[in-house]
Image (spheres, rainbow, N blue to C red):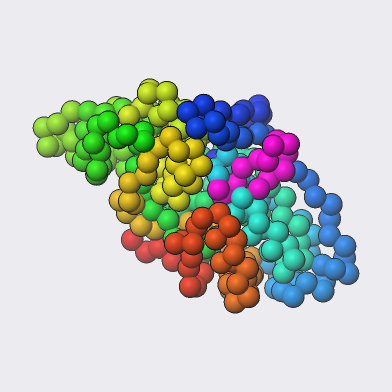
């Protein structure tokens, strides 16, 4: 199923020379001042936070901040931008709390939530039945697993089955890792050479491997992959090979907080803000009509 990703204590910048574009990633998070108490308590949905956040004025958000268009750093290597940050800005206004993003390795997000280092996660993480055993999701975007290829698609890849015998790059901790393992088994079962899977610690490294020819294809969520392909002009994305949803992530059973964010999403959809944010980043096709908790059931 789709993916997500998202890196350590050093700053990195991936320059895609082919297209002259730059994908920036950095570390740390931009800290915001606590909200004015009067403004916070007057926020339209602040009452929902009384039980949800135990009086907190700031919520810590885990996010792997190198996954445009959902989260990335601006040119100052400090300011977080993208779909999730803009939604977070609107949540702050509605709920009367500050959402502080912390750059977190994607595969460390769920353990970090379980250890209560973070209150929630916004990192374009796919809602899956397997993940629901550990965390809860408030679904907010349709997404699907996809295949990204060099622009000229020299190996004429059209489906997952065409990856047999090719070098395939995948971002660590994403659901595409399992998709790649499943394809290895399928190719072997059909008497064909297995794909050579390489797992990279972040999206930037994975994209660079594809651009440099160290990989023939990359498995990446269709939303992020489509954005990268459109921004750089160096790649092409095939139609999604499966569908699912991204969700805002919460500790298992944190019902009051989940409901507060679901209600905030409903309010943003009602006034059109939700749709405008997705449209700004080319994600209109991912728009949902409702925002279920753990909406993915298979």
Q: Is residue 75 located in the magenta-colored stretch of the structure? A: yes
Which of the pair 155/138 is nearer the observer? 155
Image position, residue 67 (x, y; %):
54, 43
The residue lying at 46 percent from left, 32 percent from top is: 207
- Which of these two is toward me, 259 or 283? 283
Residue positioned 58% across, 33% down in the render? 22
The reply, left or right, for residue 291 in relation to residue 121 is left
Q: Position of residue 181 (x, y in %)?
A: 30, 37
Is residue 237 among what the camera can see?
Answer: yes
Which span is picked out in magenta?
69-81
State whether residue 188 is above or below residue 127: above
**Percent position of residue 112, x then y:** 60, 44
Residue pictured at 59% horizontal, 54% vertical:
83
Point out the image quarter for the C terminus.
Answer: bottom left
* Residue at x-position 42% and y-position 56%: 143
**Is the residue 275 above or below the residue 186 in the image?**
below
Q: How many marks?
A: 0
Residue 226 is left or right of residue 113, and the answer is: left
**Which quadrant of the view contains residue 162?**
top left
Q: 288 or 237: which is nearer to us?
A: 237
Residue 215 left/right relative to 84: left
What is the x, y in percent for residue 184? 24, 35
| 290 sits left or right of 101 in the view | left
Q: Quadrant of residue 256?
A: bottom right
Label the magenta part by its dominant secondary structure: loop
- From what the image shows, is residue 203 above or below residue 282? above
Magenta-span inclusion, residue 35:
no
Return the residue found at the far left. 191
Residue 172 visible in this rendered orientation of the protein? no
């Amino acid at each position: 199923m789709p993916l997500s990703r998202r890196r350590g204590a050093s700053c990195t910048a991936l320059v895609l020379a082919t297209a002259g574009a730059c994908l920036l990633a950095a570390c740390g998070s931009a800290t915001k001042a606590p909200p004015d108490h009067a403004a916070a308590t007057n926020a339209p949905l602040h009452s929902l936070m009384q039980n949800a956040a135990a009086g907190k004025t700031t919520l810590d958000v885990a996010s792997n901040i190198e996954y445009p268009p959902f989260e990335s750093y601006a040119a100052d290597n400090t300011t977080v931008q993208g779909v999730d940050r803009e939604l977070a800005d609107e949540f702050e206004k509605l709920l009367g709390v500050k959402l502080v993003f912390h750059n977190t390795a994607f595969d460390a997000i769920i353990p970090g939530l379980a250890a209560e280092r973070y209150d929630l996660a916004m990192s374009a993480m796919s809602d899956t039945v397997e993940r629901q055993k550990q965390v809860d999701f408030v679904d907010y975007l349709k997404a699907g697993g996809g295949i990204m290829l060099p622009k000229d698609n020299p190996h004429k890849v059209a489906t997952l089955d065409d990856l047999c015998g090719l070098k395939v790059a995948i971002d660590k901790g994403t659901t595409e890792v399992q998709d790649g393992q499943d394809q290895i088994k399928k190719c072997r079962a059909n008497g064909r050479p297995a794909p050579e899977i390489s797992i990279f610690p972040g999206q930037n490294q994975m994209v660079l491997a594809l651009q440099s020819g160290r990989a023939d294809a990359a498995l990446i969520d269709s939303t992020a992959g489509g954005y990268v392909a459109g921004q750089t002009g160096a790649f092409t994305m095939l139609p999604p090979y499966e569908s699912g949803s991204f969700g805002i992530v919460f500790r298992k059973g944190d019902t009051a907080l989940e409901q507060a964010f679901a209600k905030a999403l409903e309010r943003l959809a009602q006034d059109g803000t939700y749709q405008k944010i997705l449209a700004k980043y080319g994600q209109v096709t991912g728009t949902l009509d409702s925002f279920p908790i753990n909406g993915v059931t298979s």
